[in-house]
């Protein structure tokens, strides 16, 4: 039997041997593993290249040298510039004033352009204003139904004229003759202002038993100027004799400033005896081209000229015709503001203005009585030019008076 102490010693010795054997086995294993790794090459990962670092240059301040002052060179004297030769100033040419003529010189100079006009039993004067044979005179001298208008001039003798156009609001009418080559023309002046006291000379043919073969000159100053219905009239300090109606009135340089009018009582009043009246040529000029192309502007007929006067009871006016429709002038819608007028025998309507482009509305035709008008043709004028369309005045029994009628007109 082994004592207790010896048994413990043997156990300790056995543990040490076992521990030593484990260490030796571990060492052998490590050696074997090391041999296996030594047989194969070790693969190392390719290092990722890093960006090359560029150093930021250190700023070295540049030392600016203080500039050395450069001596200013002495300027080389230049020879003096030559003195410019003065050019004479070009004077603006002053218009040569027209020569001042005395009345007799004016009469002689204008006589080649002035004609005597005969219409029935009436006589008047006029003047050629266009080389194509157009003559300007007073519309009051030419009745609406004038059939035979004769014109007398020393160069062409007696010839017939036709009425081309008229504007009765301006007391102007345009005639035309067929022998223009033998006539001279007078020059109208555009300025509508004629100073008071301006001398004037009217040249024309006297009428009646006083009418001779030649022209006469009537001299008088401008007394006043007035405007009536858009037309300028001048009052002249001399009365005009019969036969001078329509004659040209000139200033002392020979420019036509107006034509003689016979509307003294209407424009000036019956108290202005001993004076004359002319229509300013500037008022007529605004319509002259239209008159040459055939425009007719009428004055509304005064009622007293259409119905009998006296103790008889005036007739009751018939029911009116009221027209509406479209309006075309020269192939285009007539402009707003264009004039519209109708003529029915001796009856002439008031002038209406188109309120809108290309149309008219509620245009009334109502003569003073039925007798003499029923069945008569109604003619329409657009801006003074005769429309192609017509209507007929009919007696109405209370039925609707509205008539739709489109109008077409052309200037010339």
Image: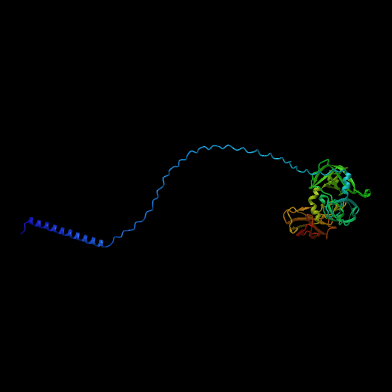
Q: Is residue 271 visible?
A: no
- Location of the N terminus (image quadrant): bottom left
**Residue 297 in picture, x, y percent from top left:** 81, 53
**Front-lying residue, 61 or 245:** 61
Q: How is the image coloured?
A: rainbow
Q: Is residue 392 left or right of residue 211?
A: left
The relative height of residue 98 versus residue 381 in the rendered view (above or below) is: above
**Front-lying residue, 299 or 202:** 202
**Residue 272 in picture, x, y percent from top left:** 86, 42
Q: Residue furthest right?
A: 209
- Location of the C terminus (image quadrant): bottom right
Q: Is residue 146 left or right of residue 81?
A: right
Rendered residue at 11%/57% (across/down): 13
Q: Is residue 82 left or right of residue 153?
A: left
**Residue 171 in picture, x, y percent from top left:** 83, 50
Quadrant of residue 383 within the rendered picture: bottom right
**Front-lying residue, 163 or 130:** 130
């Amino acid at each position: 039997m082994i004592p207790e102490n010896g048994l413990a010693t043997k156990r300790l010795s056995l543990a040490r041997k076992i521990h030593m054997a484990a260490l030796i086995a571990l060492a052998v294993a490590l050696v074997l593993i090391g041999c296996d790794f030594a047989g194969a090459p070790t693969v190392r990962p390719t290092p990722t290249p890093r960006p090359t670092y560029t150093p930021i240059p250190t700023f070295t301040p540049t030392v600016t040298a203080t500039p050395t002052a450069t001596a200013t060179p002495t300027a080389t004297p230049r020879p003096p510039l030559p003195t410019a030769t003065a050019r004479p100033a070009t004077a603006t040419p002053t218009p040569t004033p027209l020569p001042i003529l005395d009345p007799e010189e004016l009469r002689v100079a204008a006589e080649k352009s002035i004609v005597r006009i005969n219409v029935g039993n009436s006589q008047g004067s006029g003047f050629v204003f266009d080389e194509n044979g157009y003559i300007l005179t007073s519309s009051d001298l030419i009745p609406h139904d004038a059939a035979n208008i004769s014109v007398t001039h020393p160069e062409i003798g007696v010839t017939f004229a036709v009425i081309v156009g008229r504007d009765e609001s301006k007391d102007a009418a345009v005639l035309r003759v067929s022998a223009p080559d033998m006539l001279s023309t007078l020059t109208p002046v555009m300025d509508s202002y004629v100073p008071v006291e301006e001398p004037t000379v009217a040249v024309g043919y006297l009428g009646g038993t006083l009418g001779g073969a030649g022209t006469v000159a009537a001299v008088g100053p401008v007394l006043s100027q007035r405007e009536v219905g858009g037309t300028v009239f001048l009052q002249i300090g001399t009365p005009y004799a019969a036969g001078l109606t329509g004659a040209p009135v000139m200033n002392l340089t020979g420019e036509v400033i107006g034509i003689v009018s016979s509307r003294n009582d209407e424009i000036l009043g019956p108290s202005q005896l001993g004076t004359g009246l002319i229509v300013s040529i500037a008022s007529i000029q605004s319509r002259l081209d239209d008159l040459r192309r055939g425009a007719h502007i009428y004055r509304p007929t005064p009622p007293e000229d259409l119905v009998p006067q006296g103790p008889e009871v005036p007739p009751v006016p018939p029911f009116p015709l009221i027209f509406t429709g479209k309006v075309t002038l020269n192939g285009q819608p007539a402009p707003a503001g264009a004039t519209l007028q109708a003529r029915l025998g001796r009856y002439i309507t008031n002038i209406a203005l188109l309120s809108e482009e290309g149309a008219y509305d509620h245009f009334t035709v109502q003569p003073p009585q039925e007798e003499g008008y029923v069945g008569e043709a109604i003619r329409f004028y657009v801006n003074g030019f005769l429309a192609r369309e017509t209507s007929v005045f009919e007696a109405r029994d209370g039925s609707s008076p509205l008539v739709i009628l489109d109008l077409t007109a052309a200037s010339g």
